[in-house]
Amino acid sequence: MDEVDRHLLALLQQDATMPYAALGQAVGLSAGATHDRVRKLRERGVIRRTTVEVDPAALGRGVLAFVMVDSSRWVGDSGDRFAAIPEIQEAHVIAGSASVLVKVRTATTEQLQDVLRRLYAIDGVSGTQATVVLETFFERPVAP
Amino acid sequence: MDEVDRHLLALLQQDATMPYAALGQAVGLSAGATHDRVRKLRERGVIRRTTVEVDPAALGRGVLAFVMVDSSRWVGDSGDRFAAIPEIQEAHVIAGSASVLVKVRTATTEQLQDVLRRLYAIDGVSGTQATVVLETFFERPVAP
DNA sequence: AGTGAAACGTCCAGTAT
DNA sequence: ATACTGGACGTTTCACT
């Protein structure tokens, strides 16, 4: 993981369709050497996968909310229960008064309410505190 | 945006390096028609970009936290001020007691503290409430 | 780092809906 | 008009020297 690797990651985050030749020129390497670098980054798990960023609104998921989930017992291994709710995009176990923080995308606030109902159906969940997003300033990849 | 488009988006989210021939076979289309579909999804902005998912820990960003930022005045157009802090991965204007919710990734909790210091330097910011993530259950793309 | 074969993306004309 | 097929061409990937 040197400076060249970090540079490659930054470029690939911006546009992963870039050919290796152009990528190599940007970092001062041949196409073949660049190909090798990227392959190793994939093998080592630094690059998890190549994916497409989709506009949530185009998928009918215009409402974004963060929900603090309180629990009356241990939920540290209930990850699957949260994953079973497709509207939940992220779920994190947190330190502090609440137990789990989830990021939810729905089409309407009615559907958000329905997600809250399904959260309460998870064993141990004793409360939720939803925060609706009015505007997203930005969402960007982690800077290498 | 029909069923085929949604199927294509789901496949591309899993692996955007998949060849158009394989992609087409999965949805029952020729490679050329598949290419057309995907090109149109890009043109319409449904696909924002093709990118790589990088392991934050490999980049020395093992600490994840969410910070509620309180403000004593309007911060609805201070997006650039938040974007200027590279450790901030997301920033959202929210409804409720706090004004902005940010997602932060740092190497250590000391660096997290430093980010909080820089947040206070933004005009109008009157308080922060940081929540450290102990474990991430999952982070996944929005399901089409 | 350079080379070459195989695979892929991309465009086009024709065809069907 | 719009969407798909199949083929052709230029480019890119990727293993090998």
Image: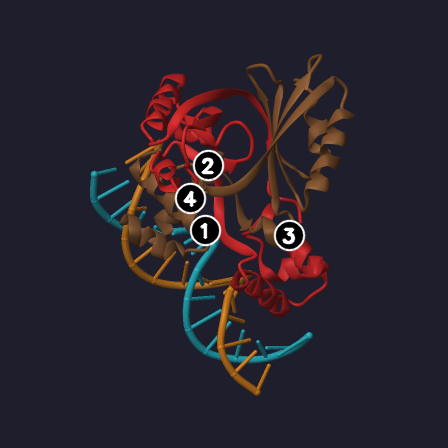
Chain colours: A red, B brown, C cyan, D orange
Instruction: Write down the residue under mark 2.
Output: A91
Q: Alpha-carbon distance for marks 3 and 2?
A: 21 Å
Under mark 3, the amino acid is Leu
User: In front: mark 1 or mark 2?
Assistant: 2
Badge 2 marks a residue whose secondary structure is: strand
Please report contact status of discs 3 and 2: CB closer than 8 Å, yes or no: no
Instruction: From this view, report whether residue A42 is shown above or below residue B106.
Output: below
Instruction: From this view, report whether residue B26 is shown above or below residue D8.
Output: above
> Residue B125's spot in the image, x, y percent?
72, 20
- Residue B16's disc is 1
Classify residue B44 as left or right of residue A36.
Answer: left
Chain letter for the residue marked with disc 4 in the picture? B
Q: Alpha-carbon distance for marks 4 and 3?
A: 31 Å
Instruction: Write down the residue under mark 4.
Output: B38
Q: Quadrant of residue A88?
A: top left
Under mark 1, the amino acid is Ala
> Residue A7's spot in the image, x, y percent?
68, 54
Chain letter for the residue marked with disc 3 in the picture? B
Which comes before the other along the chain, label 4 or label 3?
Answer: 4
Q: Quadrant of the N terminus of chain B?
A: top left
Please report contact status of discs 1 and 2: CB closer than 8 Å, yes or no: no
Classify residue A10 as left or right of residue A39.
Answer: right
- Residue B59's disc is 3
Under mark 2, the amino acid is Ala
Badge 3 marks a residue whose secondary structure is: helix
